[in-house]
Amino acid sequence: MIVVHHLEYSRSQRVLWLLEEFGLPYEVKRYERDPKTMLAPPELRRIHPLGKSPVIVDRDHSGSERIIAETGAIIEYLTSKADGRLGKPYGDDAALLYRHFLHYAEGSLMPPLLIDLVLGRIPLVGKTAQKKLQPMIDVHLDFVEHELAFRPWFAGDTFTAADIMMSFPLEAARDRGGLEVGRPATIAWLDKIHARPAYRAALERGGPYRFA
């Protein structure tokens, strides 16, 4: 049985979604953020030394367990466990796109959005810095819009785990990063993923999630 240590309003929502897409059985252990700092609670350090979410614990029938952290690593582990479903598609070009967006989501797109979030909590100076940061975010949003203008999903014609990885940063961008109707292909993509039954089922299991 897979146990997902799930932090509210966080990247771990993607793990619940992927599990729902696969139809794999799992349990959810929910954690609330500190209302003052919005950080994860210290209880998560009992599961993994970094004290972050998502973390999954996969126990087999013998009782042995694997503890896996980092969203990308979890996504790759689960797609392998599901015999490659929603994983790397056929064809060199599609496979390369899949690999790129699987890592681009956290490696390039998420960092400036996270910086923007931190700056937004700094009075006066933070707001000025946010204005200087926005052009950097816009470069990424323009890139994403261009990519989705030519195909329905990030890796091509087929929905894959790369789309699940890209969901959180683009939802965050729509919430606070300047992603608006001026980028219609990206907005249409968000509407498509939000309409998926597995996405909606994951929301029911995960609890509050402001970005949906």
Image (cartoon, rainbow, N blue to C red):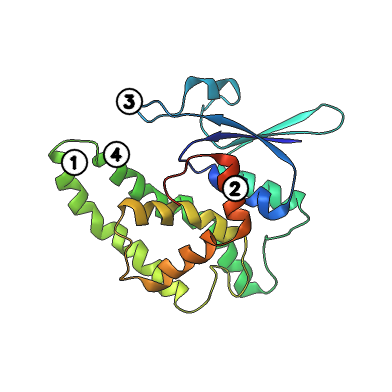
Asked if disc 4 and disc 1 are in contact, CB closer than 8 Å, the reply is: yes
Q: Earlier in the sequence, mark 4 or mark 3?
A: 3
Residue toward you, 28 or 83: 28
Pointer 4 residue: 118
Q: Earlier in the sequence, mark 4 or mark 1?
A: 4
Q: Secondary structure at mark 3?
A: loop
Give the spatial CA distance, label 2 vs label 3. Answer: 27 Å
Q: Secondary structure at mark 2?
A: helix
Q: Position of residue 49 (x, y in %)?
A: 55, 24
Pointer 3 residue: 36
Q: Position of residue 80 (x, y in %)?
A: 74, 51
Q: Earlier in the sequence, mark 2 or mark 3?
A: 3
Q: Earlier in the sequence, mark 3 or mark 1?
A: 3
Give the spatial CA distance, label 2 vs label 4. Answer: 27 Å
Pointer 2 residue: 202
Pointer 1 residue: 126
